[in-house]
């Protein structure tokens, strides 16, 4: 992979999947990047390992959010579970 993600605090990948074009989709959680508690993230890399999309989600609340699994729908759009 050609991209570096993460920060000084806890960053965890909890699941990944691949599509038929070799794109990699990751989800997990971070306490870096000014995250209050834990924030869910979803990342997409192309087949060459270049970062194409990074989304960090903070829904608020005391417990934080974690991306525990990632899947592709029939349109090849990714989403978190």
Image: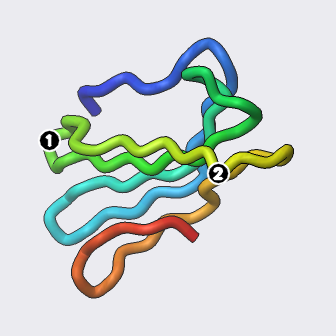
**Which quadrant of the figure has residue 68?**
bottom right
Residue lying farthest to the right in this orientation: 62
Q: Earlier in the sequence, mark 1 or mark 2?
A: 1
Q: Which quadrant: the N terminus?
A: top left
Q: What residue is rendered at 63% in x and 41% in y?
A: 39
Q: For numbered disc 2, what is the local secondary structure?
A: loop
Q: How many marks?
A: 2
The correct choice, above or below, for 34 with respect to 50 in the image is above
Cα gap from disc 1 to disc 2, whole angstroms: 32 Å
What percent of the width, then of the height, locates residue 63? Answer: 83, 47
User: Is 11 displayed left or right of 37 in the figure?
Assistant: left
Disc on res. 48? 1
Q: State left or right for residue 9 relative to residue 1.
A: right
Element under disc 1: loop
Residue at position x 37%, y 23% in the image: 4
Q: Which residue is mark 2?
A: 59
Q: Around disc 1, counting alpha carbons within 10 Å, would you say few (fewer than 14), some (14 to 19), or many (20 or more)?
A: few
Mark 2: few/some/many CA within 10 Å (<14, 14-19, 20+): few
């Amino acid at each position: 992979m050609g991209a570096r993600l993460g920060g000084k605090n806890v960053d965890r990948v909890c699941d990944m999947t691949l599509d038929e074009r070799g794109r990699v989709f990751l989800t997990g959680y971070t306490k870096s990047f000014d995250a209050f508690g834990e924030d869910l993230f979803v990342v997409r890399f192309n087949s060459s390992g270049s970062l194409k999309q990074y989304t960090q989600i903070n829904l608020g609340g005391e417990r934080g959010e974690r991306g525990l699994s990632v899947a592709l729908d029939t349109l090849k759009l990714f989403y978190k579970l």
